[in-house]
Image (cartoon, rainbow, N blue to C red):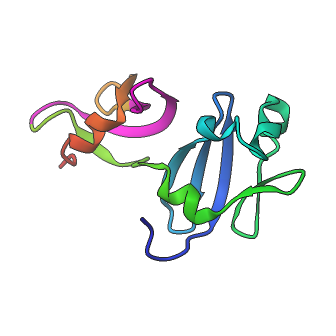
């Protein structure tokens, strides 16, 4: 739970009804809108073109038709993505950089794109594993 109210400064929508958010403290998080899409007023956002109209106003995400979500809800119910951090696959494994969230899995975990430092190759990796991996030294 956030102790201070943080403004959202950037939003990118994805076709799977997720919002990729950047907060004013630089933290990047991903918010899954799917559970809200059957509820009013969010049911009006099921049209992908309408959902993609999300933008920032007064520090939060808004859509046409006076639809918005409080920034504290976006923060508290989203998952932190350590974009840009350098990690190692386990204590002695290869180093990688955390890139972008790709999709949410059925079990609630996220698949994140990572880049292997030595080869530049990109791979997909679970967010739960990223949080367990040590910082690269």
Q: Which residue is drawn at 62% across and 43% down?
A: 19
Horizontal side, residue 48 vs residue 59: left or right: right
Residue in front for this viewpoint, 133 or 39? 39
What is the residue that sits farthest to the right in this orientation?
65
Horizontal side, residue 30 vs residue 93: left or right: right
Report the predominant secondary structure element of the magenta stretch: strand
Residue 71 percent coordinates (x, y): 61, 63
Residue in front for this viewpoint, 84 or 13? 13
Residue in front for this viewpoint, 30 or 137? 30
Q: In this view, does 27 lie above or below 49?
A: below
Residue 13, by quadrant, is: top right
- Quadrant into which the N terminus falls: bottom left
What is the residue that sits farthest to the left in this orientation?
92
From which residue to which does the magenta span run? Answer: 92-114
Residue 84 percent coordinates (x, y): 41, 48
Residue 9 percent coordinates (x, y): 65, 62
Count of marks placed on residues? 0
What is the residue that sits farthest to the front in this orientation?
39
Residue 47 can be seen, yes or no: yes
Q: Is residue 2 above or below residue 108?
A: below
Q: Residue at x 67, y 50 (%)?
A: 11
Horizontal side, residue 35 vs residue 13: left or right: left
Residue 127 percent coordinates (x, y): 35, 36
Horizontal side, residue 74 vs residue 15: left or right: left
Residue 37, by quadrant, is: top right
Magenta stretch holds residue 89: no
Magenta stretch holds residue 96: yes
Residue 96 can be seen, yes or no: no
Q: Residue at x 77, y 47 (%)?
A: 54
Q: In this view, does 104 lie above or below 41?
A: above
């Amino acid at each position: 739970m956030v102790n201070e109210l943080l403004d959202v400064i950037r939003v990118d929508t994805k076709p799977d009804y997720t919002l990729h958010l950047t907060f004013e403290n630089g933290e990047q998080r991903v918010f899954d809108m799917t559970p809200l899409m059957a509820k009013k007023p969010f049911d009006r956002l099921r049209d992908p073109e309408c959902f993609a109209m999300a933008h920032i106003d007064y520090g939060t995400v808004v859509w046409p038709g006076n639809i918005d979500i409080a920034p504290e809800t976006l923060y508290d119910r989203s998952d932190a993505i350590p974009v840009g951090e350098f990690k190692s696959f386990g204590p002695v494994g290869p180093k990688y950089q955390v890139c972008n969230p790709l999709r949410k899995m059925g079990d609630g975990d996220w698949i994140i794109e990572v880049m292997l430092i030595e080869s530049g190759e990109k791979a997909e990796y679970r967010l739960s594993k990223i949080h367990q991996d040590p910082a690269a030294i």
